[in-house]
Image (spheres, grey):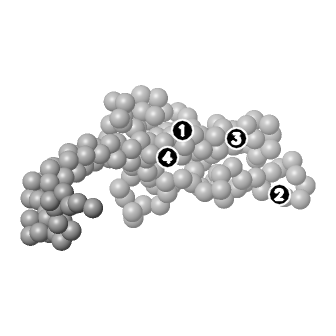
Amino acid sequence: MRSTGTSLKPGKRAMRKAAGFTLIELIVTLTILALLATVALPMTQIAAVRSDEQDLRRAVFQIRAGIDAYKKAYDDGKLQKAVDATGYPPSLSVLVDGVRDVTDQTGRRMFFLRRIPRDPFCDCPSRSNEQTWGLRSYASPPDAPQEGRDVYDVYSLSKRTAVDGTHYADW
């Protein structure tokens, strides 16, 4: 067999080339990685905000469902009625602590929530879950919610704006 002119032993040039990457290859690779990171970072931030928004929607829905269930039980005559009462719970904690079912002879308590969810946009670790929500009483107008003798609705206390441009307090 005849040799084509190349030797089997690698020369200095072949060893140097096989030892690693060139400076230009490293710079191009780092530039591509930096470009991908600048595109991916805002997307991950938006994904995190959307996840918190979904948690807020879920929490508001759960609390409102508990308030509605309390009102329905009141209207159905299962709760102690008062002359001046609206039929809405006096506080959010009542939904968790439960109230006595007056139609049940054994004195069973009715519970409307397992726990009060926390507002995901409240940066207030010292507050309890109940204190992270704004409360609107039945007597207050919808455009200027205020606390009162009962809890008719809840809203977020966050002043931030959602991804869709609405305010979290308006949800």
| Contact between labelled residues 2 and 1, with CB atoms less than 8 Å apart | no
Give the CA separation, mark 3 to mark 2: 16 Å
Q: Amino acid at mark 2?
A: Arg
The location of residue 130, given as percent across then percent down, is 51, 54
Q: Nearer the viewer, residue 30 or 39?
A: 30
- State which tag comes first along the sequence, 1 or 3: 3
- State which tag comes first along the sequence, 4 or 3: 4
Q: Which mark is residue 108?
A: 2
Q: Is residue 85 visible?
A: no
- State which tag comes first along the sequence, 2 or 4: 4
Quadrant the N terminus occupies:
bottom left
* Residue visible at 57% across and 51% down in the picture: 92
Q: Amino acid at mark 4?
A: Asp
Q: Nearer the viewer, residue 25 or 155?
A: 25
The location of residue 52, given as percent across then percent down, is 43, 47
Residue behind mark 1: 153
Q: Nearer the viewer, mark 3 or mark 2?
A: 3
Residue behind mark 3: 69
Give the CA separation, mark 1 to mark 2: 26 Å
* Residue visible at 9% across and 65% down in the picture: 13
Image check: 167 left or right of 113? left
Q: Residue furthest front?
A: 1
- The local crowd at label 3, few if under 14, some if 14 to 19, many if 20 or more residues have their Cα within 10 Å, is some
